[in-house]
Image (cartoon, helix red, strand yellow):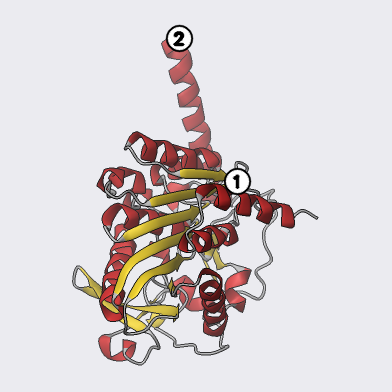
Amino acid sequence: MKWFGRHGRRLSHLLRWRLRRFLFVVFGVFGVTEPSLADRPTLGPFETPRPGELNIPVGSEPFDAAQALNGSFSSPEHCARVPDSLWVEVNGKGDCIRYYAHGLSGSESPTVLVYFSGDVMLRTTKGVRYVTQSYLSVSPMEIGKDMAKWSADSGRPTLYLARPGIYGSSGDHNMRRTHREIELMDRALDMLKERYNIASFILTGHSAGGQIAAALLNRRGDVAASVVSSAFVSAKQVAAYWEYKREIPGRLLYDARSYYDPVDEIGRIRQDPRPEIYVISDPEDRVVPFYSQLYYVRRLRAAGLKPHHIYANAPGPQHHLLAGHAKRAATLLAQGKSAKEIHMALAELDLSQVK
């Protein structure tokens, strides 16, 4: 009877999921408030992207939302015209990776702070893809100002490495979170390390950018510290969560089996000396479930590492945006502050946001 009860509940859950998938395909999912997309380009749930040659915005020119949705391509010759860019090849296919740096020079740079952003593409309850409102207002000049401030605060050179398909890099943002994205970012860091004579990195990432920071922590021996916030660091758990908890049947929209899961390669992290690792989470996170971030921390500890897990308060209703906390922690690490001082500084940051 116990066997029947347990498996009966599982079967019931699976049947409900299949019913939701059927209703989604035939009718769409109703009853949930949709964002207003009247002024934004969109891409249907099963619509094939139409990539174009990478645009090259400069100064205050905004990034192209349509290209973020559809993807873009480049070539070594075209990439040579893109400011502060790298032509990076993975498995015979190249992309133009753009970066925004402050304080870097040809002389030796002992430690550089690197930031990886989160995703900019979201879906409605009916699976329609669109770009976040914040992406529409960002420009190369704004990113440059942010890196200049981060550098001034930390006293170190700073670097914003644009992920494939967004913020000036070519590629397909529909294929984010995959092994190819990780390989591109890894090789880009190798090229930057050689170009600017960099000794070590403090990697910082938010949400899916945290996945990249965690992946590079696994693979590289030159990472002095890793700071991630609201991070997609346990890909299998997050994919399973959304597969059975959300109204949209995720398997129809993407193949989560292609995602890189940082948990799988924790055993590769350098042990001597151990890197500093900070994981910043809001227990009420509605985008990347808290338990998946906690699982990552526990796996790190089981591997003999000593991560610091800091609970923070992100603004509602999503309780997800903690990029400022991550950058602040990285700043303090670069300044040589202790774990206690970093904990206190982030607590003060939370208090400053209370209205």
Asked if residue 48 shows in the view, the reply is no
Residue position marked by numbered label 1 in the rendering: 282
Give the residue drawn at x 32%, y 83%: 107
Q: Alpha-carbon neighbours of circle 2 within 10 Å: few (<14), some, or many (≥20)?
A: few
Disc 2 from disc 1: Cα separation: 36 Å
Q: Quadrant of the N terminus?
A: top left
Q: Amino acid at mark 2?
A: Lys
Picture coordinates of residue 143, whole percent (x, y): 53, 78
Depth check, front residue: 15 or 329: 329
Can you identify the residue that label 2 sits on?
Answer: 2
Q: Residue at x 47, y 76 (%)?
A: 167
Please state the horizontal and vertical placement of residue 157, each as a whole percent of the image.
Answer: 44, 75
Can residue 310 be seen at all in this image of the molecule? Answer: yes
Q: Percent position (x, y) of residue 18?
A: 48, 38
- Towards the viewer: 18 or 239: 239
Question: Hey, what amino acid is under mark 1?
Answer: Asp
Q: Position of residue 110 (x, y in %)?
A: 35, 70
Camera-side mark, 2 or 1: 1
* 178 left or right, relative to 289: left
Is 336 located above or below residue 137 in the figure? above
Among numbered discs 2 and 1, the one appearing first in the sequence? 2
Q: Nearer the viewer, residue 223 or 249?
A: 223
